[in-house]
Amino acid sequence: MLSRTAEYLYWISRYMERAETNARLLDVGYRMSLFPNPNGYNNEWESVLAAAGAIQGYKNKYNIIEQKKVEDYLFFDEDNPSSVYNCILNARNNALVVRTSFTPESWLAINKTYQEILKLKNNNFNASDLPNLTEWTIEQVNLFRGSLSSLLRNDGYNFLYLGLFVERADNSARLLDVKYFVLLPKPQYIGGNIDNMQWSILLRSLSSFNAFRWAYDGNVTSTKIADFLVLNSDCPRSLSFCIQNIVKHLTNLTCSPEKVSKIYNTLKDLNTKIQEEKIESIVDFGLHEFVTQFINKISSVDSDIQKEFFN
Amino acid sequence: MFNEMYQSESLIRNHYNNINEWLEKMTAKMINEKNAEAETHFRNIGITFSTNSETIRERIIPFDLIPRIFTFSEWSKLEKGVIQRAKALNAFLADIYNQGEIIKANIIPKELIFKKKSYEVSMFGFTPPRSIYSPIVGIDLVRTNHNEYFVLEDNCRTPSGVSYMLENREIMMRMFPDLFHTNRVTPIDDYPTRLLQTLMSLAPIKCNTSEPVCVLLTPGPLNSAYYEHSFLSDQMGIEMVESTDLFVEGEFLYMKTVDGPKKVDVVYRRIDDDFLDPLCFNPNSVIGIPGIMDVYRTGGVNICSAPGAGIADDKAIYIYVPEMIKFYLGEQPILENVQTWSCDKDDDLNYVLDNLSNLVVKEVDGSGGYGMLIGPKSSKSSIEEFRRKLSANPRGYIAQPLLDLSFSPTLIKNQVEGRRVDLRPFCLMGENAQLSSGGLTRVAMNEGSFVVNSSQGGGVKDTWVLAE
C-alpha cells in the first residue's frame, strides 16, 4: 500500500470521527440550553467550545458566546478547521484520492454526505434545526462506518481504524479534561441538580448516557462515571477501549513489523496500566494529571504513526 | 443529412425498432424521473469534471437516455479501420524515432516532424517494448452517411473518456434492464481487464516477473479527468500514484509504500511529457520524477504512452495518416480523412482565405473545441477576425470543410429531437491489437450545433454494438 494512501485513510476516519464528536457536543449544548440554569447557560456553550478545542478560534471571530454563533461555528464555519462541514469536506477530498482503497459503498457514503452538507450549508438553518443536523451527522458517520464492514481486513482497514481510535482517544480524553472537575468527589454536591446535569453532559457527549445505566447498578457516583469513561473496556468511548483498539489495529498491521513493534513498545506500559489500574488510585494520583499524560501519549503515538508510515 | 434512427421520415431503421417502441411507452414523468436518477447517480459516484469556476467546482456532463446503436456489420468495418490506423500510427512513431524511412521516402517533410515541440529528441534511437509507443489510441470519428465515416482526429497520448463509456453503460443497465433483455448488446465491462493485460504485455526488458507491477500516474485531484484516473486504477486493481509517490534508485523506479520501496515496472501515465522528469523535460516543473527517463531508456521501466508519442496526433501530421497506412502496412485506408488544408502552404492558405465562410478553421495545437471557427455558422466579424489571425500566423492553423455530422435521436425537454453526434472508440495496442466494443458518443445538445465538446454544451450517450 502506498504511504500516501495509508495516510489518507487514517485521516478520513479521523475526520469522520471528529465530525461526530462535534455533532454530539452541539447536541449536548442544545439540550442544556433548554434547561433552567442558575449560572446562565452561556457557560455551557463555552465548555462545548472548549471540549471541541475551538474556543480560541471562536473568540478570534466573535466577541460574545451565543447559541446561534456557536452552532454555526462548530457546524458550518469554513474558518473553523474542525467544523462538521470542514471535517466532511476533508474526509471527502481524501476519499477522492484513495477511493480505490476502499469499497464503492464507503466512497458513496462519504460523497453523499458531502453532497448533502453542501445543500444544508446553502439553506439558512434555524436554531431549532440543530437536533436534525446533529442526528443527520451521526447517521452519516454511522453509514460510513457500516460501509467499512465489507472491507478487506488488510492494512488499509487497520489504518482506517487506527485513525478512528486515535481521534476518539483524543476526543474522549479532551472532554474528560474539560470536565474532569465534575468527577472529583465533592460530597456536598452529590445528588445535587448541577451534578446530575454535568454528568449527563459528559455521558451524552460520549454517547454513553443510557449505556452507563446498564453497565452499573445502584447509585450514580462520580467514581462510577470516571471508571466507566476511563477504565471500562466495555464502553466504546472509554480511554481503555480506545487504547486497546489502537494496540489491536497497530499490531494487526502486516507491513513493516519493526516499525510496528517500535510504536507498540511506547504504548505497552500505558496499555497494561489502564487494564490493571483501579479508578480510586487514578483519582488519588490526580485525574487531571492522568488525563494529561494520556493525551500526550496519544499525541506522540499519532506523530510516530505519521513519521514511520506516512513519510 | 444522415439520421442514425430514421431511414426516412416515417421509416425506422431495423436496429432502432426496439428503442423506438420503448421511447413511445415512456411518459414525460418517467423521463424526468430517469433523468433525475441518472444525474443523482453520476453525482454520487463522483463522475464529475472539475471546472475553474468558483461557484460550481464540479460539473456533470449531461447524459442522454437514448442509446446510439451500431449493428455488428457497421462496427466490424469501424473496428478494422481503427485498428489499422492505430497500427500505422505506432509504426510511424517507431520509424521517426529510428531510421526515418518515411522522411527518406519524401512522404512527410522532415521539418514537419523535427521542428515540432511534440517531437521528443530524447527518444531518438530508443525503442520501447514491442515497438508500441501509444498503447491506447482514441480515434475521433464522425459519420456522414450510411457507409461513410471520417476521422476527425487521432489521440495518441492519453485519450480520456473511457470512464464515461463504462459508466454510461452501467447506469443504462441499472435503469432500463428490460432494454438489455430485448436487445443483444455486446458487453464492454471487460475493458479495464484488457487494458491491464495490454499494460502487462508491455513490461520493460529488465522486468523478470510474469506479473509486472503497473501503476497509474495522475497529476492529482485537480485534473479534470481525475475521476477517470481513480476509476480505471480501481477497476484494474493497480495503485493510482502521484509523482511524489515515485522515486528512482539505481536502475529502477520505486513507489513509497508502508512496507518500504516497491519496484514499479509499467507506468500508465496520465500526465503530460513536460511533467514526467524535471531532469529531462521542464526543469521548472515541481511535479515529475527526477531520473525516470534514464530508467526508461535503460529498460528498467516502461512509460505508457511513450514520451514523444504526441507527435503522431499532431494536426499537421494527421494529413499524412492515409499515406502512413499505405507506406507501413501496404494497405488501403479503411477510414477516410477529412480533406484538410494546412495553412502553412501558400496555395492552401489562399484557398482557405477565399473560402473562410464555408470552412472550419482549427488551431493546430488547440483542443476542447476552443479557438476554432465554424465558417458557415459564424458572423462576418468573427470571420474577419480569423482572417487576420490566419494571415498573421498561417502555420498555426488548418482548415477543413464543415462535415454534415449524423443526427441521433436525443431527448430535449422530453421530446425526441435530432442532435449531432461523434464517436470515440478506444483501441488497445499491446500483445494484441483490439478495439473496445463500443465507445464514447458525444452529442451536441444545442439545436443546430456542431460542437460536441463537454466544455461547450456537449453531452454523452451510451453506445451499443449489437451482437451478430
Image (tube, coloured by chain):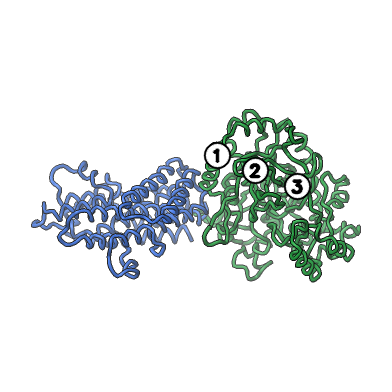
Judge whether B187 appears above or below A159 on screen.
above
> Residue under mark 2: which chain is it in?
B
For discs 1 and 2, the disc positioned in front in the rendered view: 1
**Residue that badge 1 annotates:** B34
Q: The disc labelled 3 sits on which kind of residue?
A: Leu
Q: Residues within 10 Å of mark 1 (few under 14, many from 20)?
A: some
Give the residue number, with chain letter if any, for mark 2.
Answer: B461
Q: Colour of chain B?
A: green
Does residue A84 appear to the left or right of B433 in the view shown?
left
- Taking the view exactly as shown, the residue that stands out farthest to the top is B182
Disc 3 target residue: B405
* Pick the front one: A74 or A234: A74
Quadrant occupied by the N terminus of chain B? top right
Q: Position of residue B100 (x, y in %)?
A: 85, 59
Q: Point out the tag, 1 or 2, that comes first from the N-terminus.
A: 1
Q: Nearer the viewer, mark 2 or mark 3?
A: 3
- Marks 1 and 3 in Cβ contact (< 8 Å): no
Question: What is the spatial separation of the Cα atoms under label 1 and label 3, in whole angstroms?
Answer: 28 Å
State which tag comes first along the sequence, 1 or 3. Answer: 1
User: Of label 2 and label 3, which has the lower sequence position?
Assistant: 3
What amino acid is found at the position of numbered circle 2 in the picture?
Lys
Write the residue at 28% across / 48% down.
Answer: A207
The chain whose colour is blue is A
